Structures are given as structure tokens and as C-alpha cells.
Image (cartoon, rainbow, N blue to C red):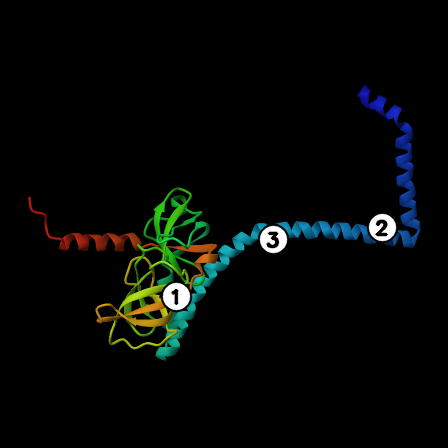
Amino acid sequence: MNNLLAFLAKHNHWLLFVVLEVMSLALLFQFNSYQGSVWFTSANVVTGKFYEINSSVESFISMGKLNEQLTMRNVYLERQVKHLSEMLERGKSDSTLQLSTQVQLLSQYKLIPAKVVSNSINKPDNLITIDKGSLDGIRPDMGVVSGNGIVGVVYLVSPHYSMIIPVLNSHSNISVMIENRGYFGVLHWEGGDSKMAFVDDIPRHARFNGGDNIVTSGYSALFPPGILVGKVHRTYNSPDGMSYRLRINLATDFSNLRDVCVINDANLQERINLMRSAKDSIMPAKEN
């Protein structure tokens, strides 16, 4: 306290100058309209700039959450568009019953939003890491989608992270079909272009056109039916001549993948266990 008093006593002339300067400025701005308007304008500019910077920071912080919400919304909207398209094509009049059925179908799925933290597209066996894990409800064998289409399947899980085998991996094999035509095949990738993949085992009697949508078939436990995979780009004969091979343009841009959703199907584990039991039951018993 003594030091403070000594400092004030030593510099009292400077303190008096500051006090008088403040009083002079206050009187100047209060009783002179021009100087007051200049002060008011300058203060508004400084305050406005501060709020602009503060708003930019808040927008940047909230942008990540907004992207997650938009990705989830895109997935739901894609399902709704497919449902409405099927209703129009089939010409069914009882839309209330159809919509109720679709709502019940979607109710068994929970979408877990996640961000991609690592990704590669130029290897034969690419992998993707996301920032959600077992503590968020993610388990192996769950399907992963983006707002544009399928991404891959959960492979390994830790408490806070998960590793995904994407479509751009030689070990990826996903059951797909030509939308609205009922022909099924297997989606796989052979390296090279990250925007292209192949669908094999399309029957020779199949009728389809370039540009037709390829969607998930729903025949596996990994994805619900109807999720967009890509569009038919070109048709080839299979090596044995017994089926067609399709080259497709993938709907998901893996080179710019940021936000994804993991599909949490409440009945997934039940279906997987049932398929494994069926597979084990038909395998011949090993001889002793």
C-alpha cells in the first residue's frame, strides 16, 4: 500500500494530466456535435469489427456440428426421395399406408454422425478412420454412409475411434442391385480411379440403361435397401460370357470425404448371428 501511495505521489502531475485530458475530451464530445459524431462513428466501427470477429469465430466453431446435421439430413432425405419415387412409379393410391410402412422401416435405424480423421484413395487396400468408437455405440460390421451414398463397413473399433473398410478396398464386397429393375450383383473395386468401381454377376437377361442407379440390395445385414451407390457408366461381358460386368460412377467423392454416418441397426447382431449359425449348420462335420 505504501508503495502505491509513493508511486501516486511521485507521478501526481501525470495523473492530473490524464484526468484533465479525459474531462476535456468528455466536454468536447458532449457539447460539440461534430466531434461527438466523429467519436460515435469511430466507436461504432470498433465495436462492429469486434462483433464481426466474434461472430466469425462462433460460426467456425459451430460449422462442424452443422456439417454433421446436414449429412444426417441428406441420408434421411435420400431415403424419402426413394420412397416417393417408388410410390409414383407403382401408382399406388394408399400413400398413408405406404408412408407409415417407410417410417416403421426407418425407425429401426439410428445414424451416428462422425468425422473422417484419416483417409487414403491411392492404395489397393485403402482405410478410413473416424472420430467415433465403441463409447458412441459403434460396433464392427456396421454400414457407413455419406450424404451422397455408401462409404464402407466398420472393421475395427476402439473406445474413441473406428476403422472402416471403404468401397475403395480390394476386400470390400457389397451386395447391390439396379434400381427399379430387380437385378442383383456384387460391388467391388480393383484400384486405380477412386471415382469408379465394378458390379459383377449381373445376369445376361437383364435389361437396363446407361445412367441407371445402382443401390444397395438390402440382402446383407450391413445396409438397408435403396442407398445410392452410383450410376451405370459402361457394360462389359464377364470373362466366362455368362453375365455382365458394369463399370459405375460412384456417388461418394472419397477424395473430399469429411462427414459420414454410421448405421446402427438394432437387429444387426441378430441377423449376423443367424447367418453365421446357418453357415455353420450346413458345413460338413470334420472327421475325427
In the rendered image of this protein, does residue 230 appear above or below residue 166? below
How much space separates mark 2 and mark 1, taking CA atoms?
60 Å
Query: Could you say whether the residue bearing mark 2 is in a helix, strand or loop?
Result: helix
The residue drawn where x is 89% and y is 31% is 14
The disc placed on residue 39 is 2
The residue drawn where x is 38% and y is 48% is 163
Q: Dividing the picture into quarters, in which one does residue 87 lie?
A: bottom left
Q: Nearer the viewer, residue 240 or 57?
A: 240
Q: Which amino acid lies under the numbered mark 1 shown in the image of this protein?
A: Leu
Of the image marks 2 and 1, the number of the one nearer the N terminus:
2
Outermost residue to the top = 2
Q: Where is residue 94 shown, x and y percent of the image?
A: 37, 76
The residue drawn where x is 42% and y is 52% is 120
Name the image quarter holding the C terminus: top left
The residue drawn where x is 41% and y is 60% is 194
Q: Nearer the viewer, mark 2 or mark 1?
A: 1
Q: Dividing the picture into quarters, in which one does residue 2 lie?
A: top right
Q: Dividing the picture into quarters, in which one does residue 279 lie?
A: bottom left
Q: Are marks 2 and 1 in contact (CB under 8 Å)?
A: no
Q: Nearer the viewer, residue 129 or 182?
A: 129
Query: Could you say whether the residue bearing mark 3 is in a helix, strand or loop?
Result: helix
Q: Which amino acid lies under the numbered mark 3 shown in the image of this protein?
A: Ser
Query: Could you say whether the residue bearing mark 1 is in a helix, strand or loop?
Result: strand
Q: Where is residue 88 shown, x and y percent of the image?
A: 39, 78
Q: Are marks 2 and 3 in contact (CB under 8 Å)?
A: no
Q: Nearer the viewer, mark 3 or mark 1?
A: 1
267 to the left or right of 99: left
The disc placed on residue 2 is none
Q: Where is residue 280 shown, x and y percent of the image?
A: 17, 52
The disc placed on residue 59 is 3
The residue that mark 1 highlights is 228
How much space separates mark 3 and mark 1, taking CA atoms?
31 Å
